[in-house]
């Protein structure tokens, strides 16, 4: 039921909602941090789950703000969007659905702090502010309650399906193996239809939380099995947006053909771990695939990468601030130079300082490569001859992640330069 309306109060509500819909960085960061603080592992750290939490929180904030902007006095309907229901299902499947209530209330509190602050920036009228705060406070609290109630009803209606799902049982067993629980390997192997006494290549496949595509994930995983000539494959649905795969005794691991084999499946991103042997290798390869996925999350345009391509960068960027300082100190003006110049220098170092091999890799004339290297050496603050390793590492960081340059700019062109396969 609507209440009597004050135009001034409604104006305050709508202006604040317009500010929220612009997604100010400070508000969104604080809001997401509050939600994550109320979550449990692995929801905070597993890349797919963390992305789902962020997408769900964002969807709720924007749904409420957009509804309030349109009709400040009308009740806001529950948000059962794909992102919101997806992470709720994942929490249920992992037996931690109880985290939903504290996570929602934590986000509610953080959002309300910013809403009050923003309200006082758009108006100084005490009467309008008091009414606007009262209306918005009740609206936000009611929205959280109706959404939680709708999610509980949805999960209850799906309870039988979610608990009987064979994928859920497979995921539970694989999780025990990954955690090093005392599970008999032969028994686990029989139940999963996959042998542990072989060489494993783990793969993580995932999609955007707003557009989950389980059939697409399955097709991509099967295509990898064929392209790698794997003797066996194991596919496990890990969340509403991700699939874990293991390839047994795969004989092909080159980035370009594997990326090409899955390129026709739009929206699916792939992180591949290194081949490793036995149960410990099964775990290690998966952890390395997850680490690769975590780095890829910072590069939305990158759809395929192997741990072999990024392991140096993951180590070098463990402390992001120190890594940025290292890049700026090592590359100097090269960091903000023509991307073509940086890429030529990076490939030249990768090819063991061979101009001919670098030219073949870059499909460029040898003299062109020589000219670019000479220009780069003029811009470098340290000599290439005596600091090739350091310069090479700094260039790999910029190639994969970009960095905060010395003047504070983040060269976006670096992010767009990454090769789709991760190969030079």
Image (cartoon, helix red, strand yellow):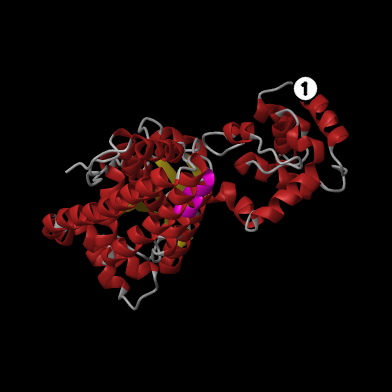
Magenta segment boundaries in residue numbering: 25-31
**What main secondary structure does the magenta stretch of the protein show?**
helix
Query: Would you say residue 86 sits in the magenta stretch?
Result: no
Q: Is residue 155 above or below residue 344?
A: below
> Label 1: how many residues lie within 10 Å, few (<14), some (14-19) or many (20+)?
few
Quadrant of image for the C terminus: top right
From the viewer's perspective, is 304 left or right of 63? right
| Percent position of residue 66, x then y | 34, 37
**Disc 1 marks which residue?**
368
| Percent position of residue 324, x then y | 70, 49
Occupied quadrant, residue 7 = top left
Query: Would you say residue 27 sits in the magenta stretch?
Result: yes
Occupied quadrant, residue 188 = bottom left
Residue furthest bottom as drawn? 182
Q: Is residue 176 above or below residue 409?
A: below
Quadrant of image for the N terminus: top left
From the viewer's perspective, is 197 left or right of 372? left
């Amino acid at each position: 039921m609507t209440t009597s309306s004050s135009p001034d109060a409604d104006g305050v509500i709508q202006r604040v909602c317009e500010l929220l819909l612009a997604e100010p960085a400070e508000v969104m960061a604080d809001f997401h941090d509050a939600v994550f603080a109320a979550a449990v592992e692995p929801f905070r750290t597993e890349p797919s789950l963390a992305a789902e939490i962020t997408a769900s929180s964002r969807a709720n904030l924007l749904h409420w703000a957009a509804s309030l902007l349109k009709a400040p006095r009308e009740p806001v309907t529950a948000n059962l969007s794909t992102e919101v229901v997806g992470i709720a299902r994942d929490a249920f499947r992992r037996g931690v659905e109880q985290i939903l209530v504290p996570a929602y209330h934590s986000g509610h509190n953080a959002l309300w702090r910013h809403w009050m602050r923003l309200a006082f920036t758009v108006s100084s009228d005490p009467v309008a502010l008091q009414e606007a705060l009262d209306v918005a406070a009740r609206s936000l609290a009611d929205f959280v309650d109706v959404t939680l109630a709708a999610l509980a009803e949805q999960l209850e209606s799906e309870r039988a399906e979610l608990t009987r799902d064979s994928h859920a049982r497979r995921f539970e067993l694989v999780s025990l193996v990954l955690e090093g629980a005392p599970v008999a390997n032969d028994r686990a192997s029989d139940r999963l239809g996959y042998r542990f006494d072989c060489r494993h290549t783990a793969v993580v496949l995932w999609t955007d939380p707003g557009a989950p595509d389980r059939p697409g994930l399955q097709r991509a995983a099967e295509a990898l099995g064929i392209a790698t000539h794997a003797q066996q494959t194991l596919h496990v649905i890990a969340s509403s947006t991700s699939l874990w795969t293991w390839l047994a005794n795969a004989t092909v691991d080159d980035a370009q053909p594997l990326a090409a084999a899955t390129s026709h499946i739009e929206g699916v991103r792939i992180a591949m771990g290194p081949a490793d042997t036995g149960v410990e290798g099964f775990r290690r390869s998966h952890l390395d695939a997850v680490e690769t996925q975590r780095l890829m999350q910072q590069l939305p345009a990158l759809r395929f990468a192997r741990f072999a391509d990024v392991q140096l960068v993951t180590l070098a960027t463990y402390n992001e601030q120190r890594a940025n300082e290292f890049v700026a100190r090592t590359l100097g003006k090269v960091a903000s130079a023509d991307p073509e110049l940086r890429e030529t220098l990076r490939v030249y170092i990768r090819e063991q300082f061979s101009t001919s091999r670098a030219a073949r890799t870059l499909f460029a004339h040898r003299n062109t490569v020589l000219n670019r290297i000479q220009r780069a050496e003029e811009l470098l603050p340290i000599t290439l001859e005596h600091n090739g390793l350091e310069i090479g590492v700094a260039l790999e960081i910029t190639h994969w992640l970009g960095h905060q340059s010395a003047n504070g700019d983040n060269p976006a062109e670096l992010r767009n330069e990454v090769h789709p396969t991760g190969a030079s």
